[in-house]
Image: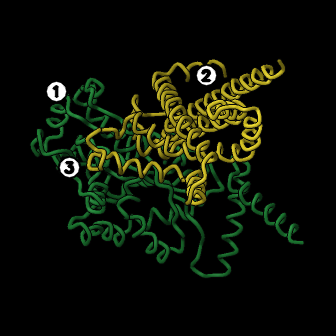
């Protein structure tokens, strides 16, 4: 008897894991239908509980804690459960292209426009921006607001620099600055690519006493929360070239009719509303003494 | 398909990742094998108070999550850690230290289990034949060689498949500490799947060749015995 129970349990566990690992498209679709059916059941149970909205976004929105802060408010206002996968901009857009998510919130305007031009997204709405800063040891680069001067000095003096090298929004920004200066970072033997997220890259820069380009939010949070106090400081901030614009795009319901387009549109409307824009503009002031994001929905950034 | 594999395999970044993986796996397997086999055999040979606890700790370490091992090594060798001045962080040497920490208990635990099963009878036989201690030890190792090969292959397999510890300690630095597995992880994070799959195939091929070599060694051993 005991054995039978065990066998049933094992079989059940296998079914669950099989369903969870379902790799090919068809299985995925089926799964989605199932979750849809499940959410519909939930709908009947509870009013104001509409189901799940899946978003792909960049690590910075998660690392700064902004999404954790917004999630319960979104649920209260619209009834959707916001879930997200925080990855690099490149991967986030890829998830949208594959129809794995309902909406994307990323920061690489050119790639976003290409995403829409290829028919994967409906329309891009600017949401907010934060800015990039260059962090590093105090010596030899003196603090400045001229990003070009800093990057030129890094190459000329062959200073250590840790790049993300992972095709993320931050990485694209960095590559663009080198490109605009027509400098080749590979000519600096102390230039390394970490291939990891922003937090890991900052830690590596701190270890190597190297310079690195980061978004301000991740830097503030990391320098405040890390066990060991960082020995790096901001050496460059305030340059107009260092702005980082976020856009939100619903994944095309024409390409992927099974996606939650209703939820995606609700989210876009919600995050661009005056109330939420105001909340975004105030986020971080309590904790870090400065806002992490500047809202700018409705502009054409 | 073949063209595609060829183009992936001839990529400079991929070649470097294969090289790093190989250097790391071979050196960590070699060091872990020496330490693990020695420790496993000694543990079987000698009885002492507290042996049970040591065996139990060994068994626990066999299942140590690699990221935990990676974290421990990271804390030891980081700039502000006790071994910071050696600047081992983000180097292949540092990765090998983490790997040795993961693989040695696996090898020693396996060897201990095998030896406990067969060594006593071999020892009894050797004693009746009047063998010296050294000859007995040699005989035990000879008789256990299949198990030893198997442990080494297992260790090597663990080594080439490791991601977490290697990512933490090695830092996944392009061209220096980026291994095949961390490359796959990075490619995936960039949404590039084809090259990741190619690397995965390459890893499998490596494992297959290794298994094959191991089989050959075993067969040779069996033929020897027929004389």
Letter of the chain that mark 3 sits on in the rendering: A
Comes first in the chain, label 3 or label 1: 1
Residues indicated by labels 3 and 1 sit on the same polypeptide chain: yes
Disc number for residue A278: none
Identified at 55% across, 63% down, the residue is A53
Residue at numbered disc 1: A156
Rendered location of residue B155, percent (x, y): 60, 38
Q: Please tell me whether mark 2 or mark 3 is closer to you in this view.
A: 3
* Residue B113, above or below A7: above
* Residue A101 visible at all: no
Could you tell me which secondary element the residue under label 3 belongs to? loop
> Which is nearer the eye, A130 or A22?
A22
Alpha-carbon span between mark 1 and mark 2:
39 Å
Alpha-carbon span between mark 2 and mark 3:
44 Å
| Mark 1 neighbour density, 10 Å: few (under 14) some (14–19) many (20 or more) | few
Rendered location of residue B148, percent (x, y): 66, 35
Q: Which chain is yellow?
A: B
Q: Colour of chain A?
A: green
Identified at 49% across, 35% down, the residue is B183
Residue at numbered disc 3: A232
Rendered location of residue A186, percent (x, y): 30, 26
């Amino acid at each position: 008897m005991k054995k039978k129970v065990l066998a049933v349990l094992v079989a059940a566990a296998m079914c669950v894991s099989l369903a969870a690992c379902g790799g090919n498209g068809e299985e995925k679709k089926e799964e989605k239908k199932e979750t849809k059916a499940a959410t519909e059941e939930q709908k009947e149970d509870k009013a104001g509980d509409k189901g799940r909205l899946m978003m792909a976004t960049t690590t910075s929105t998660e690392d700064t804690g902004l999404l954790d802060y917004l999630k319960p408010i979104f649920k209260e206002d619209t009834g959707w459960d916001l879930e997200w996968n925080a990855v690099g901009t490149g991967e986030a857009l890829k998830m949208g292209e594959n129809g794995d998510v309902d909406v994307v919130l990323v920061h690489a305007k050119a790639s976003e426009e290409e995403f829409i031009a290829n028919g994967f997204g409906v329309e891009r709405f600017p949401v907010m921006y934060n800015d990039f800063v260059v962090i590093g040891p105090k010596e030899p680069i003196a603090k400045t607001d001229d990003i070009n001067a800093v990057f030129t000095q890094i190459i000329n003096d062959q200073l250590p620099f840790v790049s993300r090298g992972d095709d993320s929004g931050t990485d694209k920004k960095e590559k663009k600055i080198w490109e605009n200066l027509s400098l080749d970072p590979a000519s600096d033997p102390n230039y390394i690519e970490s291939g990891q997220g922003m937090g890991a890259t900052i830690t590596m820069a701190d270890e190597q006493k190297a310079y690195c380009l980061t978004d301000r939010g991740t830097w503030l949070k990391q320098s405040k929360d890390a066990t060991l106090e960082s020995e790096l400081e901001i050496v460059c901030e305030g340059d107009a070239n260092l702005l980082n614009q976020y856009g939100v795009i619903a994944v095309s319901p024409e390409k992927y009719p099974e996606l939650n387009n209703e939820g995606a549109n609700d989210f876009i409307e919600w995050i661009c509303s005056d109330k939420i824009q105001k909340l975004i503009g105030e986020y971080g002031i309590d904790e870090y003494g400065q806002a992490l994001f500047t809202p700018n929905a409705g502009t054409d950034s | 398909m073949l063209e595609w594999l060829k183009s992936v395999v001839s990529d400079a970044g991929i070649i470097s990742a294969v090289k790093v993986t190989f250097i790391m796996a071979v050196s960590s397997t070699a060091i872990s094998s020496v330490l693990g086999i020695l420790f496993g055999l000694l543990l079987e040979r000698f009885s002492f108070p507290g042996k049970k606890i040591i065996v139990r700790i060994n068994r626990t370490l066999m299942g140590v999550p690699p990221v935990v091992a990676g974290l421990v090594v990271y804390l030891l060798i980081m700039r502000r850690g006790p071994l910071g001045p050696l600047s081992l962080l983000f180097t292949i040497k540092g990765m090998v230290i983490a790997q040795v920490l993961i693989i040695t208990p696996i090898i020693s635990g396996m060897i201990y289990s095998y030896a406990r099963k067969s060594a006593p009878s071999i020892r009894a036989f050797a004693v009746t034949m009047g063998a010296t201690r050294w000859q007995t030890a040699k005989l035990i190792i000879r008789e256990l060689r299949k198990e030893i090969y198997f442990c080494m292959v297992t260790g090597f397999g663990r080594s080439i498949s490791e991601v977490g510890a290697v990512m933490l300690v090695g830092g996944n630095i392009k061209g220096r500490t980026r291994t095949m597995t961390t490359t796959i992880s990075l490619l995936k994070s960039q949404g590039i799947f084809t090259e990741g799959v190619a690397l995965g195939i390459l890893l499998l091929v490596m494992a297959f060749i290794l298994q094959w070599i191991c089989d050959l060694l075993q067969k040779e051993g069996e033929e020897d015995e027929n004389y």
